Each structure stands twice: as structure tokens, then as C-alpha cells.
Image: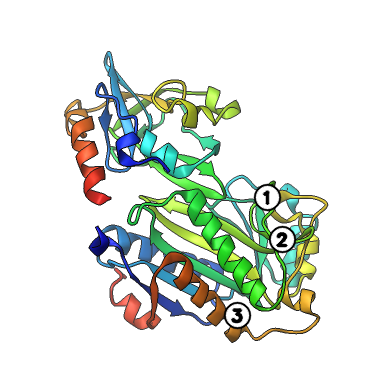
Amino acid sequence: MKKISELDLPDDIRYAEDHEWARLEGDKIRTGIDDYAQDQLGDIVFVELPQVGDTFKKGEEFATVESVKAVSECYLPVGGEITAVNTALEESPELVNKSPYGDGWFVEVKLNDPSELDALMTNKDYLEKLKGAE
Amino acid sequence: MLARFDKRWLCVELPATEYREAWDLQVSIVDARKDRSIDTNVVLLLEHPPVFTIGNRGGLDNLRVSRGFLAKAGIGVIQVQRGGNITFHGPGQLIMYPIIDLHSPRQTVTDYVENLEEVMLRTASDWGIKAERNSANRGIWVGNNKLGSVGIAVRHGISFHGMAFNVNLSLEPFGWINPCGLQDTGTTSMAQELSHKVSMDQVRNSVKRHVEALFGVELVMTSLAELQGHLKS
């Protein structure tokens, strides 16, 4: 397990309580699970993603991740409509471990309400929270 | 930092409990854990009446008999969101469902699953049974035969489901499935390995002792009624 200080927490994305991240790209956001989450889950063997066109509210379960006999729920950090899913994860779920913010992204979402993105934590706030819980 | 370490877990010993009933109870404890109306981890110990459950990635293809055959035998099949494939639960199998927060103290899913396996390995060893892990498959094994299984689900960082340890249960229903989706493997029990029945009470006590040692906690016994006082109806 990585130490909190060893976690990769880029400053160009926002973080949610349940360890998902969100990056603004035009009028959409891309999201996945962060380095803390992939490190805690261990080797990911299966990712179940929603369909393009599905809509979710902020905080709703939108995906599940399976690792070592464990199924973990993932929650959408902002509400909106799914506009793309990372189909590469069907064949290569390990991308989530290798590159959680890059090739291991989960879905793209058309935001309902931009203020929901602003309400997420910056990397500094998130790091403070993680340190506080340690 | 030490003060945050949750040194006491609540433990409830339940009578034989239907699978869905135990599932609902776990989910309500997860909710209570999340909104902090319960501040400690909770361990449920129980047995289930006969039932097959299928995990997230399992399918009916690993069932080797018809559903009609099972209906006649009075055994249901339930699809469950947990890790793993198809398995059987029944009387004589000790079930432990820990509802624990994996974030405090912070632990990885792998470490947690390995600790559950270790609880079963040490318990088997108390009766002189040499079980081991298998690098290809989770759970604990005596040779090619599975003695105990692990499968968990994580919701908002809180883990539920847990482990199933074959103590005295009838192994016949495992012949009706490919357990965990595996072929060419079998299932065993403590009774099968020892050629005699084992006291479930003694196994429960052994499991509790090993949980305390491995997780560094004290199990505080409580009743279901007392626990339910903290849960939303």
C-alpha cells in the first residue's frame, strides 16, 4: 500500500469523497477512480460500465470494479448523461491500475450543472482530507 | 493516531438466517456505518439454510443440474453483487460477515481478503488440518479441495459479505455446481478431513479468537435487538 505522501494526485483534476476524479474537457468531464482507490483495490480484473445515454445524479452508483474477490461500487462525481465509455477496459481492466487518470478512465459525462464540478475537492483539499483520516 | 484506531468491534451471533434476511441486515448496517449511527465495525456469525448464490461474474452455466431439480430439493438460487462466482451455503457452514470500514484503519482489499483467509487457515490448524492458499484461486484449500471461500462487496469504503467456512455441511450440493466457476476441483469440510463432526460452537470461538488477534481488536458480544436499536427500520 502506498503512503499518502506517495499518491499521485494531479492538480488539473478534482476529487470526490469516494475517490473518483473528474477532469473538465470542453463542456464534458472525464472521470475514473483515483490513485488512492486503485491502490486500495489491488489488481483490477473486471470493470462494469454504464451505457452511453444513461443518466445519473451526482453521487449515484454508475460502475462496479472487481478485484481479488471484491466488488466495489463507484459513484459518479457529477450528475449528467454518459456520452462515452472506455471500452478498452473490457479487455484490459489493468489499465485502471497502470494509468488511473489516463488510459484507465471510465466514462465521459455531459454535465448537468457546472457548479457540481466546482464543489469537488482540489488536490490540496483532498490530500489534507486523506492525511486527516490516516 | 492511535486514538482513531477502532479497537472494539461488535459481534452478533445469529441463529440460522435466510440469505436475503442476512443480506438486508448487512445492508442496513452498512448504511448505519456510513451515516455514523454505528461507529464501530460489526461482525455477524451465522449459518444459512441451503441456498446457491451467484456472484457478479457468475452465470447459471456453472449449475450442473436443472432449476427444476433444485426447486424440488427446495433450494433457491440468488444472484448477488459480490466478488466470486457460484457457491453453496447450508447448515454446518460457518458464515462470517464483517461489516467494516476499509478506510479506518486504512487497509487494502488484498490485505483484508488475506486476513479472512488467515482466520480460516488458523482455525483449521487448531484442529490439525493443514489447509493452504492457492496462488491461482482465492479461498483456502486442502489439496485440490476447497475448505473455505471469500467474497466481499464494498460500498462507500465499507466492506460486507465475507467468508464461508465448511465445518460439518453436506457436500452433496457442491456436486451440482462447478464451485466458483472452477472445474476439476472439489470441496471439503472439517468433518470430511477429520472423519468426525466438529462442534460448531468451538469453531465459532476459535474464529472469534483469530479475528481478535489478526485484526488487533476486541470483539464485544451484543444481541441483534441491541444492534437493531442503532439501525433505521
Q: Residue at x 22, y 29 (%)?
A: A117
* 3D distance between C-alphas at marks 3 and 2: 17 Å
Image coordinates of residue B36 in percent, x first then y, are 25, 62
Disc 1 is attached to a residue of which chain?
Answer: B
Which mark, by number, is residue B203?
3
Q: Using residue A108 as the reference point, say whether residue B77 is left or right of it.
A: right
Please report, as a chain letter, where disc 2 is located: B
Task: Between residue B152 and residue B59, name the one nearer to us.
Answer: B152
Residue at disc 2, secondary structure:
strand
Residue beneath disc 2 = B141
Is residue B20 or residue B146 the one in the foreground? Answer: B146
Query: Quadrant of residue B212 in the image?
Result: bottom left
Q: Is A13 displayed left or right of B15 in the figure?
A: left
| Mark toward the start of the polypeptide (3 vs 1) | 1
For the residue pair A98 and B154, the one nearer the viewer reads as A98
The x, y position of residue B47, in whole percent, is: 58, 76
Q: Dot 3, how many residues are within 10 Å of its Cα: few (below 14), some (14-19), or many (20+)? A: many
| Residues at marks 3 and 1 touching, judged by CB atoms closer than 8 Å | no
Q: Quadrant of the C terminus of chain B?
A: bottom left
* Residue B157 in view of the camera: yes
Checking the image for residue B137, the label placed there is: 1
Amino acid at circle 1: Asn
How far apart in space, not on screen, are marks 2 and 1 (Cα)?
9 Å
- Check disc 2 and give the amino acid type: Trp
Q: Quadrant of the N terminus of chain B?
A: bottom left
Residue type, numbered disc 3: Val
Q: Could you tell me if the residues under marks 2 and 1 are in contact, i.e. CB atoms within 8 Å?
A: yes
Q: Mark 2 and mark 1, same subunit? A: yes
